[in-house]
Amino acid sequence: MIRLLREIMKTRFKSYAKINTSLEVVNYLKKYKKHKIKSNISILKLSDKIYVTNSKKTKILYIDGNTKKKLKIRNDIISKTINFFDSKYSTKTNLSIKVVKFIPIGYGFGGGSSNASTILKYLYSYHSISDINFNHDAHIIGSDVSLFKDLFPKEIDGISIIKKKIKRRYTWKKIYLLLPSKKNSTKKIFSLYKNKKTVPKKSFIYENLNKSMIKKNIFLAKNDLIICASHYNREMSKILIYLYQNNGLFSKFGMTGTGSGLFIIFKDKFYNKSFFNEFKKLFPLASIEKSEYFS
């Protein structure tokens, strides 16, 4: 009976991305060798597709959703998730898993953590085990995995404390993601933040902007890593300057998290076309993703 149920279980999933709409570095915890942060999280409609079927042994295949080419993923978190689950719950998982990647890799959208969360939720059902320990298990696998338990916006308060924001009504709202050709290393950005002496007080982005403009700007989403990130990534810094100069078009814009990704939310769709025509001329190597965020 259990085998029959496994065979008819849903085997196609969407694995959603996320952005940090704000990020504050509270302090550095030497015990865990990690920065304690406060951050607001929104889930994006941008997603990978995951296909799961029964198999004689576990096989995991990653494919680029745009080029259809096979991808080599370092430190595969899906394998880590399955190994952890089988070890903890004394199960034996044999699945063929194909992940079609549409979430850009290396921009801080949490694609790997989202994939792990999707598979973890599936494993509870597949092995008929209660998911009561999901949050605990997810955190062991990766600090961001539990963010993808559902679509609700969340707040990170510290390393492991995650609060779900539940309101009466949420809807999908339009958002655009701007992706510089150079990617930021999360480790590098936090290293620069920790050793602020390596980042000049007059960073490139501040040298190219009117100070009063920065102080009065209420459109920029708060992110304590923005100076270190823009100092490290000149292309990203130039894009930020361009956004500052056009801030009247946006209800909000900023970094998507610790990566080099940026997001913009327009006040009026009327300006979209002219903005992007100019953006592509100025930043031909950067790419644009249109999506929606749950808020």
Image (cartoon, grey):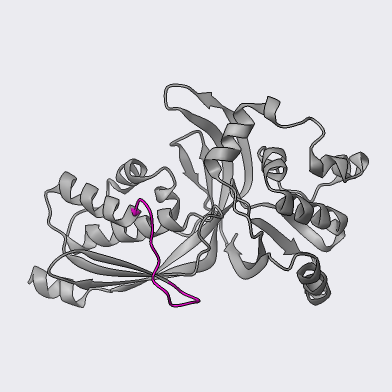
Furthest-left residue in view?
A: 1
Side (left or right) of 294 relative to 62: right
Q: Position of residue 38 (x, y in %)?
A: 57, 37
Circle count = 0
Residue nearest the viewer, comparing 161 with 23: 23
Q: Is residue 268 visible?
A: no
Q: Position of residue 76 (x, y in %)?
A: 34, 54
Identity of the residue drawn at 50% across and 65% down: 103
Main SS, magenta residues: loop
Give the quadrant of residue 168: bottom right
The stretch in magenta equals 64-76
Identity of the residue drawn at 49% across and 43% down: 163
Q: Quadrant location of the N terminus?
A: bottom left
Q: Is residue 69 magenta?
A: yes
Q: In this view, does 294 lie above or below 159?
A: below
Identity of the residue drawn at 82% across and 33% down: 202
Residue nearest the viewer, comparing 139 with 76: 76
Residue nearest the viewer, comparing 106 with 264: 106
Q: Quadrant location of the C terminus?
A: bottom right
Q: Is residue 78 magenta?
A: no
Q: Is residue 49 above or below residue 255?
A: below
Q: Where is residue 32 in the image (x, y as percent from the top left)?
A: 42, 27
Give the quadrant of residue 128: bottom left
Furthest-top residue in view?
A: 30
Side (left or right) of 14 relative to 5: right
Side (left or right) of 49 relative to 166: left
Q: Can residue 132 be seen in this view?
A: yes
Identity of the residue drawn at 53% across and 31% down: 36
Q: Position of residue 40 (x, y in %)?
A: 59, 46
